[in-house]
Image: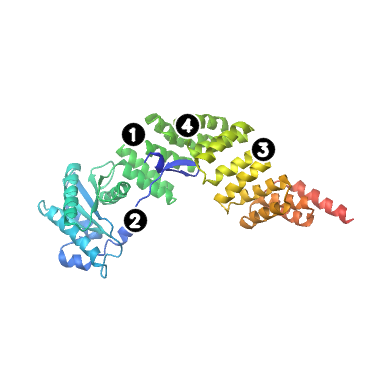
Amino acid sequence: MGNRKNRHLTEAFLFSEAVPHLDHEEVKEAREVLPPQLAELFPDLKAGQAFIDACLAQVKPLHAFGAVSVKVDALDPPEGEGAPESQLEKLKSTAQAIETACAEKGFLWGLLGRGVFALCLPEGGDGDCREIGLAVQDAVRDHGLTTVTVGAAVFPTADFKKAEIFDNILKALDHAAFFGPDVFTPFDSVSLNISGDKLYHDNDVQGAIREYERALLVDSGAVNVHNSLGVCFAVLGDYPKALDRFDMASQLDPSEIMPVYNTGVSHLMMGNRDKALELFLQAGEIEPDLFELLLETGKIYLSKGRTDKALDYLNKAVASNQDAWTGHKYLGDCYMEMGNPSEAAKAYANAVKCNPEEAESLSSLAVAYDQIGENPEIALSFATQSIEIAPENALCQYRMASILEKRGELHKAVRHYEKALAQGYPCRESVIDLKDKIKRESA
């Protein structure tokens, strides 16, 4: 979860990327559906909540038990009546392997949901779950029809209740999806980190926080979990808590760039620009070619008027990610600040190429062409496109007005100045002055 390819930007922060492959809601919705072909072959087979209830009744007096999930790999929907014969054969093959493994020890097994079986191991521990999980995998593989991915969880774990263990074995399957099919993966803090990431990306930040906090109960030294918690707190505006988590992550692994970078972003959002720059430079010693880091460092230098430094970092940002419009856009801003509209126009054109619907890049391109002065029609065209895409953008409206005013189209310019003013752009004086000019010329 901490390597570079599994990171992405979220709300300006670096976050470990989780892409769960198992739709838990789909599994839950299918819990009561028992394919008739399986029911005929295994008349006592329980499915869904009926299976979970039977397991919970069995383990109620026990202080420990294990559970194993078995997901049939490459099983295309639907699996019920009318499903292709090959799918049914994969299900039957898996069910037979599980029944054989459970029969020797008297373990309960059933269908947890679509394509997912589960086993309950009274008084079973990690080793027992691994042993039976690998045995089922071997048996299914020997049948030659499919492979299965296996997850496992045990009670007690952290503060989880017995019933929650059956959710945990689904989370273990999500975790397993990162390693490919035909793997065995036990539930651990990474499983919870992945689950928390999913909640975060579903905009359930509070749910993600609860999941991450549970992950720390399982492993208090999980660097990515501390970082992910910090991101959640920062997104909620609780920067003291965010900084505390980022600091803990950095202490646990000084070589990890995410918490250092995210600490810098937090300070930037709190208005501590100099501290943010200090942290970004520190992060650059860990990973000098990270696009987000180069971009943010360049932006700070640009805001401080250090165009020489800004140009260096923004050029490096563009080189590290040619497809990101933001790098090209800010490079263009830097060239404009340096009084070089020709180079700025090239950068803005690249930004528009990367993202044709980015209104401010189009508007900036219009301004650059307007300053070059060679083809005013092109400038007007780009300005027009920008307000067609984002009519509510005050800056785009203001720039459109400025270009129209230069062209002598004063009445049109006033309308766009007024729109910009209504949308919050500070251009009241421009409106007043231009209206006065129109009156004088009309007199």
Q: Position of residue 208 (x, y in %)?
A: 39, 46
Name the mark on residue 62. Answer: none
> Sequence-wise, which precedes: disc 1 or disc 4?
1
Give above or below for 411 relative to 123.
below
Question: Label 2: which residue?
Answer: 23
> Sequence-wise, which precedes: disc 2 or disc 4?
2
| Quarter of the picture holding the N terminus | top left
> Sequence-wise, which precedes: disc 1 or disc 2?
2
Q: Position of residue 406 (x, y in %)?
A: 77, 50
> Sequence-wise, which precedes: disc 1 or disc 3?
1
Q: CA distance from mark 1 to mark 2?
A: 29 Å
Question: Label 1: which residue?
Answer: 221
Q: Residues within 10 Å of mark 2 (few under 14, many from 20)?
A: few
Q: Visible in this render: residue 88?
A: yes
> Sequence-wise, which precedes: disc 2 or disc 3?
2
Please, what secondary structure does the residue beneath circle 1 have?
A: loop
Question: Label 3: which residue?
Answer: 337
**Quarter of the image where one finds residue 64:** top left
| Quarter of the picture holding the C terminus | bottom right
| Residue at x 62%, y 31% (from the top left corner) | 308
Question: Label 4: which residue?
Answer: 283
